[in-house]
Amino acid sequence: MSNNPSGQPDSGDSGEQSWPEYLSSRESRGMPRSGEGSGESEGYGPPRRVIGTPPPATARTMLAGHGGDGGGETPRELPADPPDLVKAKKAERVVAACFLLATLAGLGFLVAYGLIGVGSVRDAQHSNLWLGGTLSVVLLLLGAGAVIWVRNVMPPVEQTEQRHPLRSSNADRAAFKETFEEGTETSQFVKRPLIRRTLIAATVPLAVAPVVLLRDMGPLPGTSLAHTAWRKGRRLVVYGTGRPITPAEFSTPGAIISVAPEGFQNDDDAMAKAAVIIIKFRPGELGAPTVMPWTVDDIVAYSKICTHVGCPAALYEQTTHHILCPCHQSTFDAAHGAKVLFGPATRPLPQLPMGLDSQGFLIATSDFHEPVGPSYWERS
Amino acid sequence: MSWITARRRHWAAGYVVVAFVLVLIGGGYAIATSGSAAASSPTAANAAEIAQGRNLFVQNCATCHGLYAEGVNGQAPSLIGVGAAAVDFQVSTGRMPAAEIGAENVRKPPHLTPVQTHAVAAYIQSLGGGPPIPSAAQVSSVGANVGLGQQLFVANCAACHNFVGAGGALTYGKFAPPLTASTPTQIYEAMLTGPEAMPAFNDLTITPQEKRDIIGYVTNVRALPNPGGFSLGRVGPVTEGLVAFLGLLLFLVLAALWITAKHGKAHE
Amino acid sequence: MSVERALESTGNWLDDRLHGARGVRVLLRKIFPDHWSFLLGEIVLYSFIILLLTGTFLTLWFQPSMTDVIYHGSYIPLRGVRMSEAYQSTLHISFDVRGGLLIRQIHHWAADLFMAGIFAHMIRVFFTGAYRKPREINWLIGIVLLTLGLLEGLFGYSLPDDLLSGAGLRILEGVIQSIPIVGSYLAFFLFGGPFPGHLIIPRLYILHVLLIPGLILALVSVHLFLMFHQKHTQMPGKGRTNENVVGAPTYPYFAAKTGAFFFFVFGVLALAGTFVQINAIWLYGPFNPVAMSAGSQPDFYMGMLEGALRVMPAWQWVFFGHTFAFNVFIPALVPLGLVFTLAAIWPFLEQWITGDRREHHVNDRPRNAPTRTALGIAVITFYGILWAEGANDLLADFFNVPLYWITWAARVAVFVGPVIAYIITKRVCLGLQVKDNRLLEHGVETGIIRQLPGGEFIEETRPVDEEVLARLVARTDYPALPAAETAETEVPPSKMRGGLGRVRERLYKVVTETAPAAQPNGHGNGHGPGRGIEGNGHGHTAVSAGAGSVQDGESGEGDQH
């Protein structure tokens, strides 16, 4: 009556119903050790006897591992004690010592938490040291104690378990195939293409809907990547202090400073494209392709945003006139239009056209003439 | 009549008086300023100091920089107009006299004493002016706006020197040195004069107060304890990753070896 | 309460509702094989659990907001500085919450260990061939977990919005922007506008604390379930065959050992969190798009991408008003894409080449699969060179080497290095196999010298003991492939036809190249009885008692190997 396709012998059972057999036939894993008897009693379901009467004989014929009602002696699979009890005792003491120390350390953690406050760098250092130190001790000692316990107090054991091919038997596969095909046929899904096709059609817009819902995650870039906050007449101010700059002040050859458009210092979105560096050269040092009409008094302005992937390129060597971006070492020649000398950047740093306003401060005479920062598809 | 009055019309009497007064003033000045070489105004160098500086210059610097600091092409630049601050920086950090021509000069134990350094600086200052040595008050970061200092530092300095001044690589074998040993005066002077490849930040672009703010940030942060433990050089994730692999993972592999070792294992 | 009473009261209560007795018993007795390298996956698992625990703690104080504030807190050097709330809350956790700095550091160390563990575990699985049938699904799940881990770590360390990780986000934005056609749209969608915007941190936050951990949790559960269901592999050894598992039962042995290892993982992370500072964001300062530091690197597991970006020459193509920024999207997509794709298809590629579609439950020793090992080392070399290039400025500073030289060296080494590594590794593996054969055939040297009647001195050897013998003889015997070249009148078998068939044949020869197996019963000229080695052509060799006698001193000339 039971299907038992796993090929195992029928397990002995109370014989009254096929349900426990059916269940056992589904469990083809966890087979008993080779050499032991196969099969186990089905102690499943409500007891079949009235309380007080002795259990049926069949309930007592099981072997490995099952408690059962009044079952016989089950042979041990694991030894109860290690072979050398003296060594085990010593190891036990070591383990206990580990755990005791761990307890103390744990209490230390609680005390340290209560006693040591934070609120400054030094206090944080002390707190970290004591809390972390005690915690480390607790955890490592627990680990060490557990390992010594397993290795020296528990009896050593090596057992073998059988594997079974993962492939289901052919009969199982056939049965699956049959059931699945039956279900498919009954569902009429294959036989009625109208239902099938309209169902698929209905799911398509539904599947697209979540993607469409993401549309408002951000605005379209439009042309915004090509423009910055620089405008004609906007003053250059020292980033951080906000002071406008005159060429007479910024007069030391080899000087460099990071500048922002006036009023935009604290606007990170603007500064991510509008950050600029100005560099002072000696007469005659600047040359093509630097656009000389855009310079003032041998002061040249370049975008600080590296054209590779957008890090601020602020490292400047006044002896070599190299601007080096610290992220990926793109190197630009500041004396010659910030053209690329080395590294992965492909475009020179855009130059900002500069002039002077009526009070003698440096201003931009227009926005950059090309997009700043990393390349993108629409950039020609 | 005292003996001195009797000789008041000696032919050398005038010279003696002048010489005596000079020695008095010079010696008095030397005694008065000997304990605070950097504290007093640097422009009060006198002829004796300049002369001493000249001598020291000829002994230690002229072989590269030329007998009158005019520079030697391909060897050392002219020092006319660089100012006392630049000299003080280079000499007090031991960079000058340079160990060899051409390579980047690194900080090393200074060759000249502070007094001698000042003398050389005074001499160079006398040749063509330039930024003077800043006073102690000028470089003091008491009351500095450290927050502004941080902003200026990360915008202008960290690209070479790293977030907290741990140093970094430049091109062609040069490097930006760590700032751990720099005195406030040296930091000020370096910003002001732009030594070697470092650009210059004059007092009109970054005002003295802003320089003090930056100095305040640098000195403050480098003195901070590391609350999280060993800082691994304060350079960030590279050293941390090395510790993760060579420290943590290795430790755990050793623990795994211990746990699974064969000692006390079974026989079957 | 005694064990029996507990089982009867609580145990029965549960069993009445869950029908667990049989199933849980199976689990209790399940055998787990014991090898140190099998614990590498546990490092990953336990690091993940610790990440969940410490991460939850951090969420109680962290504010995922980019709103600007002026700082007036405990960390003096940043007072008066404008920063985001996210950064401020991280400073707060570090300096104003007891245990905050400790938990923050443990969290970050655990993330590093998680990724380091994944690499170690993945390498172990690869070199022992544990990805072979039936474990291909688990291998693929593992690669997905690796990818998720990379993203999770990247998003996690970007949350505090400090200068270092903010630079990383800027680079991410630049990379996305460079993608042809859709780049700028994707970048604007991710950041909710131009960089930096004010949406990226909250968005990364929800990815980092909810979506990706959920995915990882689900996949890890499937990963572990499959490992349970298929049973763990085992290393070759005495009594270990392809049809069994030898070890100790879960309860109490494996449970105790794995519990102990959990404490070790947690303990070592606590140790690191106490004594080694990590991600000191107060030193970096808050993010601002104008500032940058020398020596900026991402966390180590992103190092390969960083190195790829640095090593790439400046190469772009402007075509009809559009830019192909090869210098950016090639290093971002190609090296990692190559490595991951190769890893993902490798089990199937190997199956196709060798024709070996049997189940494999006994691991290979790396030396016994020389081509696989050599290929793995070559890929690791490729990865490692790009990784080192990611730290090129620190290397230049530390080792006093000019900066550009390192990049030039990396540009050459990234192609040459893996080839050299492959060749060397292959030779090393074959050499080790020959050494093993020699041990099998000649025995272990005892150090006892004897003089023969004829006057010569020989060293006595003894046979290897059983445990070692079992390990030495275990090899995968590949099934033979039918020939692709046949006589004029014959048709080659279907799988070997055409150009593809010839390619397959050639690859088969390369992939299955190994030193020949040790000969049973010594070799041709009368050596001792050998070790009783019997091969039976399966994926393992059965081992008999191998009781060879002491060598009679022949020097073994004229042997063929």
Image (cartoon, rainbow, N blue to C red):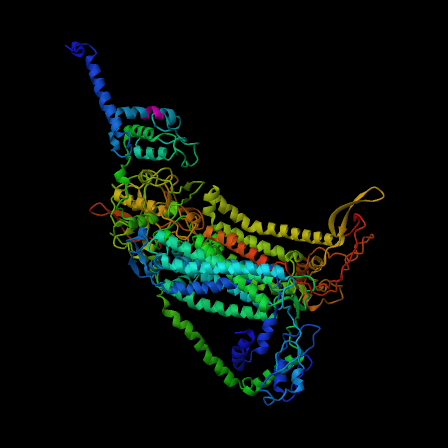
Residue that protrudes farthest toward the left in the picture? B1
Residue A199 on the magenta span:
no
Residue that protrudes farthest toward the right in the picture? C453
Q: Quadrant of residue C176?
A: bottom left
Tell me if C320 is positioned left or right of B205 in this view: right
- In the image, C368 versus A281, the foreground residue is C368
Tell me if B200 is positioned left or right of C102 in this view: left
In the displayed structure, B260 sits above or below A32; it is above
In the displayed structure, C25 sits above or below C354; it is below
Q: Is residue A351 visible?
A: no
Picture coordinates of residue C68, whole percent (x, y): 30, 59
Report the predominant secondary structure element of the magenta stretch.
helix
In the displayed structure, C227 sits above or below B164; it is below
- In the image, C437 versus C184, the foreground residue is C437
Picture coordinates of residue B161, whole percent (x, y): 38, 45
Tell me if A145 is positioned left or right of C76 in this view: right
Q: Is residue C385 visible?
A: yes
Picture coordinates of residue C184, whole percent (x, y): 39, 61
Q: Which residues are magenta?
A: B53-57
Picture coordinates of residue C471, whole percent (x, y): 69, 59
Q: Quadrant of residue C162?
A: bottom left
- In the image, A269 versus A139, the foreground residue is A139
- In the image, B36 versus C204, the foreground residue is B36
Picture mark count:
0
Q: Residue at x 59, y 82 (%)?
A: A180
In the displayed structure, A21 sits above or below B84; it is below
